[in-house]
């Protein structure tokens, strides 16, 4: 298989073989993950779901009392390099009338690190903000 004619931005973008399926480690990613900080004001818990060969993220935001169901959003999966079939992280986006939340996730040593990039779009002049929290099964 010829790979030298492919577009690339760095040496690591080119390999001799292509992977079209993710490894069986995907099963370790699936399930309910809880925020290790019970006093969070961000995401209280999340669930990673597989449906029809697509991975979805289902998030629940922490409220003063209880949780807010954000619904499900499809995930774009990433490995640590172009030659690996092991999932190292993913991104997902949640759209609300007043806000857009982009979630970036990576998994390390059985811990899910969740970053959220929160952008207000309601004209309220609230500052956009970033958070990073840790989750475990």
Image (cartoon, rainbow, N blue to C red):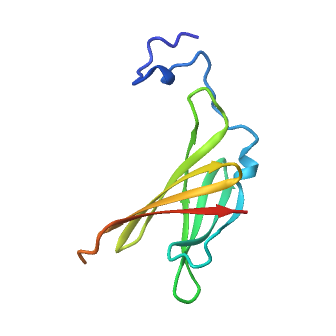
Residue 134 appears left or right of 99: right
Residue 73 appears left or right of 107: left
- Nearer-the-camera pick, 63 or 133: 133
Q: How many marks?
A: 0
7 in relation to 90, above or below: above
Q: Quadrant of residue 58?
A: bottom right
Q: Residue furthest bottom?
A: 65
Position of residue 129 measured from the top left corner of the image (x, y, whole percent): 36, 66
Position of residue 29 measured from the top left corner of the image (x, y, whole percent): 70, 52
Query: Which residue appears at 44% of the width and 12% of the height?
Result: 5
Q: Quadrant of residue 88?
A: top right
Position of residue 87 measured from the top left corner of the image (x, y, whole percent): 64, 42
Quadrant that contains the C terminus: bottom right
- Nearer-the-camera pick, 99 or 51: 99
Residue 91 appears left or right of 126: right
Position of residue 46 measured from the top left corner of the image (x, y, whole percent): 62, 66
Quadrant that contains the N terminus: top right
Query: Which residue appears at 65% of the width and 59% of the height?
Result: 48
Residue 134 appears left or right of 42: right
């Amino acid at each position: 298989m010829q790979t030298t004619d492919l577009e690339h931005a760095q040496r690591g973008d080119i390999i001799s073989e292509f992977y079209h399926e993710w490894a069986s480690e995907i099963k370790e990613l699936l399930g309910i993950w809880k925020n290790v900080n019970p006093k969070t004001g961000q995401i209280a818990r999340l669930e990673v779901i597989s449906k029809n060969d697509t991975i979805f993220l289902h998030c629940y935001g922490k409220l003063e009392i209880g949780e807010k169901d954000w619904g499900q959003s499809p995930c774009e999966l990433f490995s640590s390099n172009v030659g690996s079939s092991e999932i190292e992280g993913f991104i997902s986006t949640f759209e609300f009338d007043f806000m857009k939340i982009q979630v970036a996730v990576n998994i390390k040593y059985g811990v899910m690190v969740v970053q959220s990039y929160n952008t207000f779009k309601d004209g309220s002049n609230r500052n956009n903000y970033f958070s990073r929290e840790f989750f475990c099964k």
